[in-house]
Amino acid sequence: MNQWADLNMSSSIDTTESKGSVHRLTLANYVPRAVGFAAAFLMIAFVIIYRGWTLWNLVGLGLFCFIYPHVVYLASKYSANGRRVEHFAMMFDSLMLGFWTAHIQFVFWIAYTFLTATLLNNIIVGGLRQLVKALVLFAAGVIGWSAIVGFQFRPEAPFFIEFLAMAMLMLYVGSVAFTFYNLNVKLMKIKRQQEVKNRQLEETLHELDQTRDELVEKAHKAGMADIATGVLHNVGNVLNSVNTSASLIRRAVEGSKLEGFVKANSILRQHNENREEFLTTTPKGKKLIEYYLQLEKPLQAEQSEVLQQSKRLGEKISLINEVISAQQSFAGAGNYTDQTSLSKMIDDALSLQAGSIERHGLNLTRNLRATAPVMVQKSKLIHVLVNLFKNAKESMETNHPENKDLIIETWQDRENVFLSVTDNGAGVDNEHIQKIFTHAFTTKKGGHGFGLHSSANYMNEMGGTITVKSDGVGKGATFTLTFPRAVPDDERSGKQQYDAA
């Protein structure tokens, strides 16, 4: 006989299989099938011996009961579709149980056990559609064998045979109840985990709010109010996604089917003493089984929703941490000059703009060659890079969503290190090239003209330069930063340090 163990499998069934691996449904049903058919052999053998039939009946019965389960296992193992093999085997099980039911002339408790097993096995695994197929095959087995040997109805049997069949049936029904109990335990565990995650989420959101306040204060103290505004804008946008995911998780928990499941289990416990009769003969018991069977999909959907939103939360919180970490790394840098790598500064600046770059759908390309370190004031260089990224993003606002290219490159020669930012946006008119870095010059509506002017001033203060090249309106622009190469401490010994971009 088949079993109910498929309920204990993972909620998601892997549809990709390879030869040599047994499908999980077959693996779960292997031991119950082997044990169930061994029990069937025992019951039918007693009937055969009691009625004095030829012992050749036992040979055919033994071959089926003791070899067939292993044949199904091997067929699933070496088939490209083990799940299909197992479902075919379940249909064959139903046919053969009908066959043996007719063969033993409908001994009442054995026939009742076989029919109950067929009903529960198939409705648990495949629902009403599979149940109908199984019952049709069970009936086909009964009718087919009756047509061969003639219909004979002798339901009576000695008490010890009836007792054995009743014991097997009670064991089977008990195993179903035990499975539902395990499912209830798992659901309670999931609910507790969701409650813990909700509390952690609320604490994280509170910490993020505090961090955002601290970020504003530090940005102003470092004279980076303009960048801090951009950072807060990005963090705020990410927090909107965090709050959305938190609301969806909370809604999934509040609307969980768990409460109904607990009530159903309470009803089942009230009938512990007559559980078999309650489940198989009363309308309420049958409805209870149907209710349990309908729980799988909504519970899977709840779990999938919580896992999806939890993953999304993790990604967004990691992004916020990166933005805050990058801002804090240069906010406290002050105005002193330090040796650093361009690739590190580019990563920090991109982190500050990560939310904006993602939101505007920019296609980012980094061609960062290995370069020597440069001597810069980190807060000022970050200001320059963020301003260039912001200008590039705004210049591509009217581009097609799939045609927004932002290219960052680094290279060097014997004296200087170079960093360029290229976009395929609005470009720069030839008459504006010479004025683009002057104070208060802007072509933007509502622009103040301070960004590129202050960037040029910062580059001059660090001993570098900034230049722009554009082939005209609508043809994009390239801004190039030039830095003198820093002289590493160990260059005196003939060694040269390079930024591993």
Image: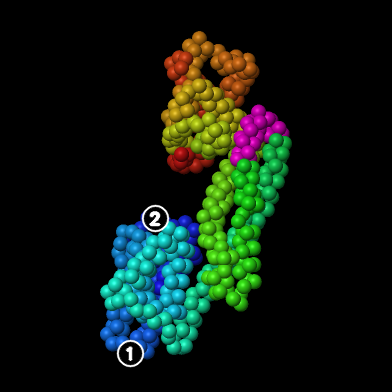
Q: Residue at x 62, y 42 (%)?
A: 244
Q: CA distance from mark 1 to mark 2?
A: 49 Å
Task: Note whether 376 is above or below 200 in the view shown.
Answer: above
Whichever of callouts 1 and 2 sits on the residue coming sooner in the sequence is 2
Q: Residue at x 47, y 28 (%)?
A: 401
What element does badge 2 sit on?
Answer: loop
Q: Is residue 230 magenta?
A: yes
Nearer to the camera, 437 or 51: 51
Pinpoint residue 370: horizontal percent, then vertical percent. Answer: 44, 37
Q: How far from the left and from the top, in percent, is residue 175?
A: 51, 73
Residue type marked 1? Gly
Query: Within the magenta stretch, is there residue 378?
Result: no
Disc 2 crowd, CA 10 A, few/some/many (<14, 14-19, 20+): few
Q: Quickly name the residue at label 1.
A: 52
Dot label at residue 15: 2
Front residue of 272/68: it is: 272
Residue 81 visible in rendering: yes
Whether residue 325 is visible, yes or no, is no
* Marks 1 & 2, CB-CB < 8 Å contact: no
- In-image side of 442 versus 133 (left or right): right
Q: Nearer the viewer, residue 347 or 265?
A: 265
Q: Amino acid at mark 2?
A: Thr
| 404 left or right of 447 in image | left
Residue 354, by quadrant, is top right
The overriding secondary structure of the stretch rendered in magenta is: helix
Disc 1 crowd, CA 10 A, few/some/many (<14, 14-19, 20+): few
Which stretch did the figure color magenta? 219-241
Please, what secondary structure does the residue beneath circle 1 have? loop
Q: How many circles with numbers are drawn on the protein?
A: 2
Counting from the top left corner in percent of width and height, residue 55 is at 29, 87
